[in-house]
Amino acid sequence: MSAFHTAAAPFVEGLARREVRYQACTACGHAQTLARHACSRCGATALEWRRATGRGTVYSRTEVMRAPSQAYRALAPYTIVIVELDEGARLMGHGTPGLAIGDRVEAGFFDFDERTLLRFAPPGGDA
Amino acid sequence: MMRTAWITGVGNTAFGRLEGQDALDLMATAAAAALEDAGRSRAAIDGVLCGYATTTPHLMLSTLFCERAGIRPAYAHAMQLGGATGGAMLMLARELVRVGRCENILVVAGENRATGQARDSSIQTLAQVGDANFEVPYGASVPAYYALLAARYMHETGLTEADLAEFAVLMRKHAMRHPDAHLREPVTIADVLASKPIASPLKLLDCCPISDGAMALVVSATPATDASVAIRGAGQGHRHQHLSAIEDTANYGARDAAQRAFAEAGFGPDAVDLVEIYDSFTITLAILLEETGFAPRGGSAARLRNGDFALDGPLPLNTHGGLLSFGHCGVAGGMAHAVEAFRQLAGRAGDRQLPGRRRAFVHADGGVMSSHVSLLLAREDTP
């Protein structure tokens, strides 16, 4: 758990509890990805973390053949997806092989290198 | 009344594997060449801007460089903006000259990125442009970020892998004419498509190499005696840092930067006759060409196949071979485009010299299409 930023703690803690969380703006309702100190749409600073359903749509995907380090080479090849949650925020995660842009998915979780991470799969499939 | 800022000289090392030289050695070599090219003595340099080097993470790199290089400027610091650092340094050098702060500014960067560290180390350092909690833990790397960008962009525009391969082939063709380029073996579309998969849809030859090298330019308050090349427009755009935060695939920030630069220069893309655009990956080049107004969305490969970006076309593109083939050593890789633009406009391109080039568009991108700097260079005397 090295060096995660304080702002992201609620997200990381959520993953550890098998929950997907996102930041919502209490002023305009905008749902955003990452952990920020202001709303990317209206600039308001009153943000709150909410629990997402974990369901969404694949926005982009890649199959990584060349892993960046020895630890990840054990997983390669692996699929990385960007998923647009039904609530509107976009999240990166691993995905089951063969996912395509536009596919419906739901979040699952896996533990790797002392973290809990997201793995998206078609609804009802094995996450 | 603002003064005009002129580029008066440039210099570089070869790019490739340059064993036994550290970042400062490389910077010093390029700087010496640029000073000679500009006809400026070390004593005449009153400003120094330098780029960071991941292999030399020093707190005061500009001061360290000046000490090594025997320069005592009145203004100096290093800058960090990823691949856009060189563009940003040139933009700032121009401002410092325009307002009268400096007379001659040395802009320099270099790095032993290929031989100064293990490949995994370099890839992991670069991967940190991603978010530490939301992206990096997934085993994402810069190629993976750009692969995700590419997959979405191709989905929206219809660009294909064969389209992207055209850019890799063109860059190699251009690099083959430059003696200092890192990669000079000819490649075909079939070679690119058959090259090792890295992160789909990107393959090895869609990616720039990791090189050693350095680049330097001198920006002055008076033009060179043989050629007056001015920086007439500059603009930046910063809309996000992380891939996950990108909202609009029709404006990553490059359009903002380009429009600001064109507005300042008082001419548009139609008046440009040379383009030098950041090309860390084939997809980077395609997107930037389209977003900055040199091809319709999804239409960059069609322009390429039409010969428009060839050396004898109306809009020669990256005539030094770009990051994809001239090579990429970090900040200096993104400065090579401006160096080549100056040489072509000034008539100092030697065997690569194209006839009659007068207006160049230079664009640099840092991160994951995160930070953008556009520059417009113009030859203002009669060659």
Image: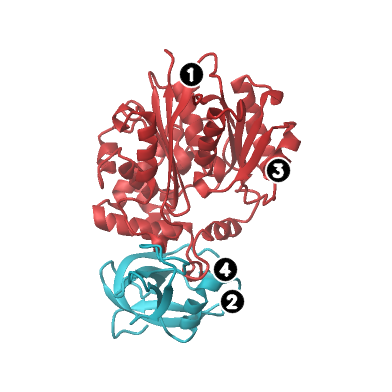
Chain colours: A cyan, B red
Q: Chain of mark 2?
A: A
Which residue is located at x 60 percent, y 59 percent? B121
Residue linked to disc 2 = A1
SS for callout 4: helix
Q: Circle 1: is it few (<14), some (14-19), or many (20+) Cα within 10 Å? A: some
Residue linked to disc 1 = B228
Which residue is located at x 49 percent, y 79 percent? A10
Can you see residue B23?
yes
The alpha-carbon separation of the residues under discs 2 and 1 comes to 56 Å
Residue B8 picture location, percent across and down: 55, 23
Q: Chain of mark 1?
A: B
Residue linked to disc 4 = A70
Q: Chain of mark 3?
A: B
Which of the two residues, B165 or B70, is positioned nearer the viewer here?
Answer: B70
- Sooner in the amino-acid sequence: mark 1 or mark 3: 3
Residue linked to disc 3 = B20
Tag 1 and tag 3 share a subunit: yes
The alpha-carbon separation of the residues under discs 1 and 4 comes to 52 Å
Task: Name the residue type under label 3.
Answer: Gly
